[in-house]
Image (cartoon, helix red, strand yellow):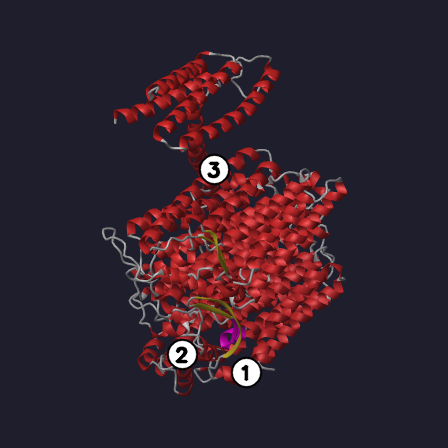
Amino acid sequence: MENQLLTIITMLPLVGAAALALMGRGERSNENALRWTALLFSTATFAISLALPLTTDLKTFETNVPWISAFNLGVRYHVAVDGLSLWLVMLTTFLVPLALVSSWRSVTYRQREFLITLLALETGMIGVFVSMDMFLFYVFWEVMLVPMYLLIGIWGGERRVYASIKFVIYTVVGSLLMLAGIIALYYVHGHATGNYTFDIAVITDHMRSASFLSLSEQRWLFWAFAIAFLIKVPLFPFHTWLPDAHVEAPTAGSVLLAGVLLKMGTYGLMRFNLPLFPLAARHYAAFISALAVVGIIYGALVAMVQPDLKKLVAYSSVSHLGFVVLGIFSFTDEGMQGALYQMLNHGVSTGALFIIVGMIYERRHTRLIAEFGGLASVMPVYSTLFLVVTLSSIALPLLNGFVGEFLILVGTFTSPVLPNAKLFASFASIGMILSAVYMLWMYQRVIFGEVRNPENLKLKDLNGRERFVLAPIIVLIVLMGIYPSMFLNRSAEAISAIRSRVGLPGPPVVQNNGDQPPARLPFNSASQIPKEP
Amino acid sequence: MIPLSWYLGLSALLFTIGAVGVFIKRNAITIFLCIELMLNAVNLTFVSLSGYFGDMGGQLFVFIVMTVAAAEAAVGLAIIISIFRNRESLNVDDADAMKL
Amino acid sequence: MSPSTNLAAIILAPLAGAIVLGLFGKRMGERAIGVIACSTVAASALLSFYAFFTHLHALEAGERISAPLFTWVKAGSFRADVSLLLDPLSGIYILFITFIGFWIHVFATGYMRGDSGYWRFFAYLNLFMFAMLVLVLADNFLLMFVGWEGVGLCSYLLIGYYFTKDFANDAAKKAFIVNRVGDFGFALGVMLLFLKSGSVFFFTDGSRGVTGAFDWALMQTADPLTASAIFAGGITTIAVLLFVGACGKSAQIPLFVWLPDAMAGPTPVSALIHAATMVTAGVYMVSRASWIYVKAPSAMMIVAIIGAATALFAATIAIAQWDIKKVLAYSTISQLGYMFLACGVGAFGAGIFHVFTHAFFKALLFLGAGSVIVGMHHVQEMQRMGGLKKYMPWTFRTMAVGWLAIAGFPLLSGFFSKDEILFKTLTSDAFEGVHLLPKVLWVVGAGTALLTAVYMTRLMVLTFWGKERFSENGASHADHGSEHSHHAAPSRESPPSMVVPLVVLAVGAITAGWVGVPEGLSGGHVRNYFEHFLRPAIAERGQAADAADASVPVRETFRDAESVEPPFKKRDVVNENHDIEIALTVVSSVIAIGGLVIGWIWFRRKPLWQPPRLLEEKYHVDEAYDAAIVEPIKQGSSSLLWKIIDIRIIDGAVNGAAALAASVGGVIRHLQSGLARSYVAMVVFGALLIIGYFVIR
């Protein structure tokens, strides 16, 4: 309880944002000071967050104090990391400084506000991953929405207003359903146990020992949460906000949108839907897996024919995230570990792809593939780094993408719970072929061939700052591919705890018919959380 | 002693006068005065019922209403003045849009 | 040196070279680059020889030298290590990979002279050596897949080496994607194997607590030879799926289309990757998984039929090609078909033997072709060659060796391996109940052998004999050489850096076959050392039952098999076959020499014989694939999926919902007239309604 590290990590960017807001107004020279301040705060956040993976016992970081105690609401400020959220927090703190540096010069107006928005976004994102209280979770979930809305709406491209509103409405539709779900869960749980609390850990523990939810309740609540998360993922057919949002968002926005925001959907599925509604999750697993497989193939096919680089990467995200969802609903250790790993991979690789596309956009102010060609001759370093990221995205072994994708496929293939598991895995494997098709074709049209457009002859290769942005990503791509145990070992326990709730073959763990009144729990759950004096 | 019904009757009369005034008048100031009239009609009801039931709550409420009315008058008059400045008119029907 | 260090160093040396060249090569001179590239491969070769010969006795005794490095992926019950395995099979592979690889590196230092991407080329080439060595040294399927995809990547990079040329890029992409189609099967096969056996490791290793998939396979009863077994999801399905992967990598029907196009890469690449090493990875994998295949006779039959069909099919195309490298490419496909034919009839040892000899003579032929191409100033069409014998004597002499070897001229390397395959095909007992099949396969194989001798003779005659046609315009047949349409006269012989490797490989092409002289030729007095050596590493039919009964650990089984006579082949049967073998040897010699004579007479007389259009245009397979697969997918994705489903239907629904909300709002908006008094009226009306409700209630 004494360790406030998570609070510091969460709030430090916000402090940075406040500092930026208070800094003196001035001319251009001042803009650099603003950038450096923002970078300082986000880098400091990353440096501090490094303490998380370096500590063996993640429990030491838990903070759990009452927050809103009026009306006995039981809202608590409960933040913690476990194997599930650890690497996602790290991913966030890792990507934000890179996103900042990648758009060092590309933002030409409202620089201060841009930086403030980015830092506020970081707080929101970290908050979502560390919240262990549904109320707090929801607050951060919505907090994160606003800066992203502003990023797209203010610093976006031509159709930014359309894209930003589409993004917000899609997300809000889902999150309102989730809010309803949270409140319903709160009351049902409180009614059944007498302990009115929003605490995720407590509710999950109660679900573990005895179900207080009937099957039909589970189904309703499952969808209330699932729709919010599946929109965020985004799973086919909820994906159409993504290409628009990505195309219009500035580079930093795209990086964080693809790198972190999309992971919140899959994170939510693993944090809420699987452990809380295991029966419903198993009941709908085949349906959602089918959507995921459709998304994998559909996203890849549509990505293949996109004329716009960012749209291509956006649709490829639909395909990649389909893999993640498939892995989650395989209910196997392999599949779910692979899914978590694939989330990180996608964050790193697709984040890098957006940075790379941003670099070329800064130079040419176009993202149409047809405008390029032959860049290998004029920008050799760029081409090489682009190749590594491309290969990582098509899951070449010894780069990060392969481990995640293969584990997901193995997990799905061998899933004892999912019906037609082999069929799903086989179709998903087609995505493996298609990803090579669209990525290599894109790479070929942009990088190889003769320089046909004279505009491209003048292009300069990457400067020091740009190399500095990509270098850590490339290192991480290789490291994650060669030594995944470093990451997988930390998450194994948390994943198998979730898996054990839903993944056992045979009859599900929790048996409760809709007709019977929910059973009251035998123990007083107040003892679960020590109350503060 | 005057029976309660007389007080209530007067109050209802004043309230109706105020309400009708709000309906049919177009001058913002007049409408404003009519609203004050309605408020005071309610005040009268409060006071009389307070005396009738011997409950101080009613009189307490009158003070609250008077305070609110004063605040409202201040804000409302300011708005009316700024409307007049912008539109050179006190006719409420002219001010049917937020923008000019 | 401990085995772990030794084996790790074998794979790490070329990797180090690739990293150094990749990072700093740009600032180095050609000489330094060449030295680094060749020396790392030389180190790897020396280490391979060291490892092989220090452990030779252990390998002969059927032991496996294992070098676990670290656990790579572990999740749930799935585990794959980065760990290396030296057994007879991988031992033979690392020997010829590093040996031939080294000489091709040397050749390339001369061939690539003056190229602006010198450093890049050698970085890729070194990286390829690394990936190929990982492929063969891996002790589990997942690590093998690393090498498998790694060689695919290097192949992609090297085919597209001339990245400003569109045809090279298209060929590179095609190679990668067609290989991915194969990998799709491979990955599914591995997953199914994991599902069934619970492991992706080849063999059990108690010290690390891993069980072996092959040990599981050993315990299984063989599937029946039926079509339904293929789809039953059992061991036959695993074998067929793995073979799909092999088809992709080793360019078999229907996935062979990438290999001819792959000739867009520099010639040393064609020699190393697309002839000697990488393309034989499929054969390697099938032989490695022989433990699975012997339990799946249906899969074996598919392998044999596809192999034989590919051999014949590619040979017929090879006879009609004009580009010297294309001829060799189709010849490679054809020879790979041979190797699969051997595997399919259960003669995995013979297949590997052909891989081994083929590596020498095909690398030699490709390097020779490269030498010719350099001499001809990058002309590749044989119509514009001829009479080169006197200009390039050493290239001619060495290539002639390769020509005779591939044609199966007696006592050269190709003779022994081909002969062995044909013999094993005819006498195969792999397909019980289908007695005719071995005979049909033998006829196809023999016919292919004849064709091989003919088209190789055509190549030699067109290139080295006859009249000089340097100024004739053969561009009409050229698909990409046409930019060099200036008159090319041959220069002198190539530099020593190119000639010396040719000579070394020529010696190899003559002698490589002698390590595996068929037993029949000596009447059974001399063992076929090569196959005998390989025996512990590969499974044979019938081995299963004994092991399953006794359920003894595998390692012991081998020792027994060594001390006692092999339980699976009765000695007298072998003796009986010796007569057939000798007879067949005579037949194959006649076929080979006959083919050479036919070719000689035919093409000396009409060197520019116009082959049938259908053959020259490769049966239009590429066009058919384009029309049937590529275009429909592109069109469907663009016009149906994206423009209709995504934009019209899904986005239409979303935007339609928004438009609906907007239009409803547009109607209700009129209530907000802005008239203060109408608002008051609404308030009063509402108040009256509420009061009325309470009054009436």
Mark number displayed over residue C427: none
Res A521 visible = yes
For the view shown, which residue lies furthest in the left direction?
A: A515
Q: Residue A529: percent from the left, percent from the top?
A: 42, 61
What's under tag 1, amino acid-wise? His
| C86 part of magenta stretch | yes
Q: Residue A412: percent from the left, percent from the top?
A: 40, 58
For the view shown, which residue lies furthest in the front direction?
A: B1
Is C488 on the left-hand or right-hand side of A439? Answer: right
Residue located beneath label 2 in the image:
C578
Above or below residue C304? Residue C520 is below
Query: What is the CA distance from the residue labelled 1 to the residue labelled 3?
Result: 69 Å
Q: Are marks 1 and 3 on the same chain?
A: no
SS at mark 3 in the image = helix
Which one is in front in this view, the residue at disc 2 or the one at disc 1? 1
Residue located beneath label 1 in the image:
C55
Which one is in front in this view, the residue at disc 1 or the one at disc 3? 3
Residue located beneath label 3 in the image:
A169
| A74 part of magenta stretch | no
What's under tag 3, amino acid-wise? Ile
- Out of A217 and C178, give the one closest to the viewer: A217
Mark 2 or mark 1: whose residue is earlier in sequence: 1
Tell me which chain the residue with mark 2 is part of: C
Crowd rating for badge 2 (residues with CA inside 10 Å; few <14, some 14–19, many 20+): many
